Image (cartoon, rainbow, N blue to C red):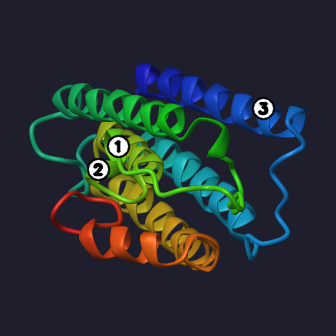
Amino acid sequence: MNAAMVSTWVWLALELVLRVRDRLRSKGSTEHDGGTRLTIVLLVVIAVNGAIAIAAILPATSVFQLPGGRLPWEIVGLAIMWFGLVVRVWAIAVLGSSFRTTVEVDTDQTVVDRGPYRWVRHPSYTGVLLITTGLGLAAGNWISLLIAVVLPVYALNRRIDVEERALVATIGRPYEEYRAGTKRLIPGLW
């Protein structure tokens, strides 16, 4: 679980860099995000800390432990976490200066449908969900996994609803057409 915690700290450092970048560019207003940035931060922090705490206190003999021992799940979980981090960084890099940690759409913004955006509309959020799911798996128990998936999914779905309304209002029909042809978070499924 130590490697998963270190990976979580790397992820936290990335998120802090993004917030600082927004500030330096005078971006990142929460005026139009409907409280979703705060909701995401709170629920993801609760999910991450809850998953870690439960892993620490749950007895090794508990029926809630994932089958096969903790080590294989830690390895799988770490791989998924790092894949999620790569997906998130890739999505951010493709959006470039249009990426924000809040809901803000530039008036001249166009639909981005390259890189990971050709498969899903919100790959940076897919990355977050991969990171938290990987952490839940690395924790090695069903309770941690459930918390690490459900809370972030709820928070990110709220954000996506707000964000997509803003994108349709600003970009219009091109975004509606893009939305009709791509899934939210999981290619071909959802």
Counting from the top left corner in percent of width and height, residue 133 is at: 35, 48
Q: Are marks 1 and 3 in contact (CB under 8 Å)?
A: no
Q: Distance from label 1 to label 3 (Cα)?
A: 23 Å
Q: Earlier in the sequence, mark 1 or mark 3?
A: 3
Looking at this view, is 100 or 14 the one in front? 100
Looking at this view, is 69 or 145 the one in front? 145
Q: Residue at x 35, y 43 (%)?
A: 114
Counting from the top left corner in percent of width and height, residue 38 is at: 74, 62
For badge 2, the amino acid type reads: Arg
Q: Does residue 165 lie above or below 58 as drawn?
A: below
Q: Quadrant of the C terminus?
A: bottom left
For badge 1, the amino acid type reads: Arg
| Quadrant in which residue 29 is drawn | bottom right
Q: Are marks 3 and 2 in contact (CB under 8 Å)?
A: no
| Residue located beneath label 2 in the image | 118
| Residue located beneath label 3 in the image | 21
Q: Residue at x 16, y 28 (%)?
A: 72
Q: Residue at x 39, y 60 (%)?
A: 121
Which numbered tag is attached to residue 114? 1
Q: Label 1 neighbourhood size at 10 Å, few (<14), some (14-19), many (20+)?
A: few
Q: Going by the image, does 34 lie left or right of 139?
A: right
Counting from the top left corner in percent of width and height, residue 149 is at: 39, 59
* Mark 3: secondary structure: helix
Q: Are marks 2 and 1 in contact (CB under 8 Å)?
A: yes
Counting from the top left corner in percent of width and height, residue 129 is at: 40, 51
Q: Earlier in the sequence, mark 3 or mark 2?
A: 3
Q: Residue at x 23, y 25 (%)?
A: 75
